[in-house]
Amino acid sequence: MPEIHAHDRLAFRIFYPAIRVFGRCLLFIFGPVKTIGIENIPKTGGALIIANHLSNLDPVAIKASCNRPICYLSKRELFGNPVGAGIIRWFGAFPIDRDAPDRKALQYAAKLIQEGHLVCIFPEGKLSESGELLPIQPGFTLIARIAKCPMITCRVKNTDAVMPYAKVFPKMSFKRIIVTWNEPIPAEMAKQTDELLERIKKELSPVLD
């Protein structure tokens, strides 16, 4: 199972405040963040965060806009290098296989949520090169059904102006990054897949602004 090991969890708790401050400083220089709907983030308890994916900077922007630590499901390819994998795990990330159903990763995400953590997933499965919302993959509903947790959509905008598609270094941008946290979706909706996917599509769609 793709667990965040005990020592990684400890490092995550210790370094998370510094990581968040670093992220906010980075974004203040390259593209300041405006947060909308922060009151929709529960102060305690687990929840599944469902976000669109424009840039490799998205996790940094989401972390910077949230007042609680967040764990992430990240593509398995990022964990190929042992040193890099260790650092990523310290940031609260754990691997998921994008090319095949990865039930173990989804079950582990549910376990973290049941323990009271926030877990973020990018259900498009990959970066959007065009900026348009890609088809939402329904695998995340298994997490919500197992964990019986609320779901919160988190829409990021303009991260691709600071770190364009497939790039790993930021650039200066005059566009403000906007992170919008929408109202929690009740756990019961995880059983209504079509209705849930439609709601998530509307809340993450770039045509809302």
Image (spheres, rainbow, N blue to C red):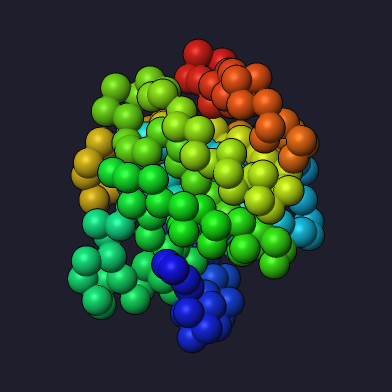
Residue 73 appears at what percent x and percent y?
45, 54
The quadrant of the picture occupied by the N terminus is bottom left
Give the quadrant of residue 2.
bottom left
Left or right relative to 104: residue 86 = left
Residue 154 in view? yes
Q: Nearer the viewer, residue 46 or 177?
A: 46
Residue at x 30%, y 57% (from the top left corner):
76
Residue 200 appears at what percent x and percent y?
59, 26
Q: Nearer the viewer, residue 106 or 170?
A: 106
Residue at x 66%, y 51% (from the top left corner):
146
The quadrant of the picture occupied by the C terminus is top right
Give the quadrant of residue 130.
top left
Residue 37 in view? no
Residue 189 appears at what percent x and percent y?
72, 31
Q: How many marks?
A: 0
Up the image or down, 25 lies above or below 165; here it is: below
Residue at x 66%, y 39% (from the top left corner):
152
Residue at x 54%, y 71% (from the top left corner):
16
Up the image or down, 112 lies above or below 143; here it is: below
Left or right relative to 46: residue 71 = left
Up the image or down, 205 lies above or below 113; here it is: above
Residue 129 appears at what percent x and percent y?
27, 28
